Image (cartoon, rainbow, N blue to C red):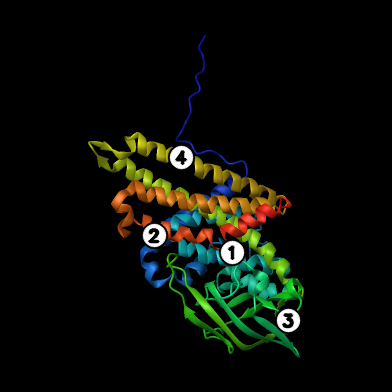
Amino acid sequence: MTETVIKPDHETGQKSPIFTDEHEDLRASMEAWVKKELHPHRNEWEDTKWPDEAMRRAGELGYLGLCFPEEYGGQGGDYFYSLVRAEALSYSGSGGLGMGFAVQTDMVLPPIHLLGTEEQKQRYLVPGIQGTRIGALGITEPGAGSDVAGIRTTAVLDGDEYVINGSKTFITNAARADFMVLVVKTDPDAGHEGISLLLIDIRDEDGNDLPGFSVAQNLEKMGMHASDTGELAFEDMRVPADSLLGQLGKGFYHISWELQGERLVAAAGSNAGAERLFETTLEYARDRQAFGRPIGKFQAIRHKFAEMATKIESSKQFTYSVAWQINNGGYPVREISMAKLLSSRMACEIGDECIQIHGGWGYMKEYEIERHYRDMRLNRIGAGTDEIMLEVIGRSYGL
């Protein structure tokens, strides 16, 4: 009697329970596009910033509207498509490009879809999905970051217009955006209940700043060089009263909801970025010779890969589990915060370890590892710092 011997196949990727064949087909096509049309320009865009044409091209291919209804030009897909998109973009080799795209698809457009009037959806959501208009999200100020309730930018109703005064900083897409979801104080004395969202144009069709709006300065950053980041100034900028997005005085709750989607996509991006670093470093360890053999054959290095792979897979699967809850109608703020905290810390650990394995070459720009490490560091700050995530998690247990 012949016995069947089952042996592990380490070369076959594990199939995730949340992704269907349709998800995987999208992953394959988008990954191929990213590698062909975006990845070759990764170094060039560190100096020039990624071009608006890249966003328009993504819109033409249907990659921006994956999770939005077909009636607005989207593909009507589920939440998991957002994860597929974030993971596919990691193959661009440009953290700044991934950041700029994520602002459009996962930070600006979702609240317009959820809260916007039909007129607002036609004016901003439709061209946003097409990639013909680019958006920005205005939350952070020089004196208020994680403390959203501490913002000072005001919008005072004057007849049928709001008059906006104040400033925002660390704003991604600031130098290129056509419109913005802006967090403002409509009632400075009402605390959380005095915050509202405005959906406003900031540039005309020729790309000129509208009256009352300006980019005070373009900011120099440690990483994400391909993405423009600016400090914005609003000086008696007048916008129509129907620019209000959602309910008056409920902006704090609206933006708190938006941040959850932003944080989970950041987790997916962190996991994917760590995977790309792992793959690059694994190839290096197989080729790099020391003392007569590939460095990956040394136990000290082999164990580093075992540790990294375990951390990446654990973080990735937890993120998928949280995404499943969201896709099934849940609002798991605690778990989203955990996923964001875990993945961003993990990615930075992986980046540091990969530089170490590369040795001196890891510190050189030639191998691009140092850039990925610098880009990754933002994930522990943006969309809520590690400290804020810990506070959210701790308070969720009644502490």
For marks 4 and 1, give the CA distance.
33 Å
Residue farthest toward the top in the current orientation of the protein: 1
Q: Is residue 136 visible?
A: yes
Please report the residue visible at 42 percent of the width from the left and 66 percent of the height from the top. 222
Label annotation for residue 242? 3
In this view, 123 is above or below 84? below
Circle nearer the viewer, 4 or 1: 4
**x and y percent of residue 248 in the render?**
76, 76
Give the structural element (helix, strand or loop) at label 2.
helix
Kind of residue at badge 2: Arg
> Which residue lies under the disc numbered 2?
371
For marks 1 and 2, give the CA distance.
24 Å
Horizontal arrangement in the rendering, residue 236 relative to residue 289 (left or right): right
Tag 3 and tag 2, C-beta contact below 8 Å: no
Give the structural element (helix, strand or loop) at label 4.
helix
> Which residue lies under the disc numbered 1?
105
Q: Tell me which corner region of the image, top left, top right, bottom left or bottom right, holds residue 110.
A: bottom right
Kind of residue at badge 4: Glu
Q: Earlier in the sequence, mark 3 or mark 2?
A: 3
For marks 2 and 4, give the CA distance.
22 Å
Circle nearer the viewer, 2 or 4: 4
Horizontal arrangement in the rendering, residue 37 relative to residue 259 (left or right): left
